[in-house]
Image (tube, rainbow, N blue to C red):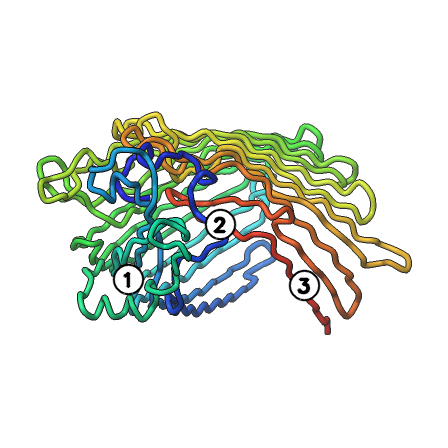
Amino acid sequence: FQYGDPVRNLGFTRADEAPLDYRQSYYGPGLRQDSRSTNLFGQVRYRISPSFTSTTYLTSSHSYSQGNGPYFYLGSNAAVSGGTITTPGVNTLLRADQSTQDSRNQLFEVQQLFNGDFQLGGLRNRVVLGLDFLRIDSNQDFLGGIIDQVPIRSVSPGYPQGYDYRAYFTGATVRAIYAANPPFPYLVTTKANTYSAFVSDVLNLTDKLSVLAAVRVDRYDNKGGLYYFPVAGYAQTAASPKFGVVYQPVKDRVALFANYQNSFRNQNSSFFDAQGQSFATRPEHANQWEAGVKLDAASGRLGASLSYYDIRVSDILRTLGYTPANVAIQSQDGNQRSRGAELSITANPVAGLNFVGGFAYNYSAFENTSDDVNGRRPETASSPYLANAWLSYRQPTGALRGLGLGVGGNYASDNLIINRVSLGEFTLPSYTVLNASIFYDQKHYRLSAKVDNLTDTHYWLGYTTMNPQKLRNIVGSVAYKF
């Protein structure tokens, strides 16, 4: 969607009403990106005593990207004409590119854990003591812009034979445009160290009642860099406690649980207030309460869990307005509320037959942010209702032993990806996607075939964007076991 263009100018409010060809590619050859990554992991485990173990984890990750990232805007007639056309409608597709050049990201982490399981005062304690060091060195170089605008319908006035979308928006053309008129680069560089310490203890008061207490402390040391604008170095410390309780009225069959936890997220940025002063952003904090029940019945053949949660996020950065130079004036006092329920069920009623299913509901809304979104669901919150199910059967005995099949799917309700007073509302419609598989599994080999999106459903995902997903596709595989 073109930035700042209200939904009412489009003439439609849902992705399935857009005048786009679901199967049409809107760009040509050569628009590709070279991405490479290397990940190394190491683990050293040492038993100090029968009650204590030491585990050291080492992680090193390197990634690189360079190349094009094509994307598109729906250009309303009002926006494209500069306001001379007021009738809602879309006849134009704006084609754009966001490239990366020599962008690199490096991560190094060392984590040391001491795990203890011992009796103290006749009560069982399961203790974790941990230290963590994380270093991030990121250099991201973005560039790009709008390349051209084309008719949104292939066959349209001026193009009776159909518009060739592959003819101009190509890798060679984009490189030539950038060579003639270098685009403005957007640099994001970060060098930051995080030093963490944490401790937790699960205490069994009885064989049916246990309690948890934990705390984590992070020291965040940002060395400074660029986030479109220079960001001065700064250091912050944040602490996060957690408490929980589990009671089993029927041991190993029914468990009631409740917990509270605080979490935080370093935002790695700065902001300008209404007086023009620059401040480093504080960590966002979330306080979560959760309670629920877990069931294990029929000797493990039926399991279920049901939980309810309530989350309040504070210290959200919100925009109050803009300076004449188009610099955002912000304040870090926004809040967000989220609450919901989750249900999961597993069943193995007879040998070879398995069922897994789940359902989730989430309510989310901004509080004390800007008038444009106050009380509204965040555009990145996804669908409020989600469900999934998978039923499979594997023949356990006889001549057909190892032959199996499965069927299932996923459901998501309507998703508001634009939800503002100023812009209106735009919806990605609800969808149900069905999948199926068949396999023949033997001791030394496995043959399988899987069909995703069995009914060839048109559906979209996205966070403030509409991204069409794959139609029906079939994948077969052959595996040999040594």
Locate the C terminus and report the quarter of the image it occupies: bottom right
Mark 2 or mark 3: name the one nearer the start of the chain: 2
Q: Amino acid at mark 1?
A: Gln
- Which label was assigned to residue 140? 1
Tell me the residue that label 2 is attached to. Answer: 22
Residue mark closest to the camera, 2 vs 3 = 2
Please provide percent x and percent y for residue 353: 78, 46
The reply, left or right, for residue 69 in relation to residue 211 is: left
Residue at 59 percent across and 37 percent down: it is: 387
Q: In the current view of this chain or complex, which residue is farthest to the bottom?
A: 482
Location of the N terminus (image quadrant):
top left
Tell me the residue at 79%/53% (across/down): 394
**Pick the front one: 263 or 466:** 466
For marks 3 and 1 on the same chain, the one whose residue lies earlier in the sequence: 1
Q: Sequence-wise, which precedes: disc 1 or disc 2? A: 2
Which quadrant of the figure has residue 111? Answer: bottom left
Mark 3: amino acid: Gly
Mark 1 lies on a secondary structure that is strand
**Mark number displayed over residue 476:** 3
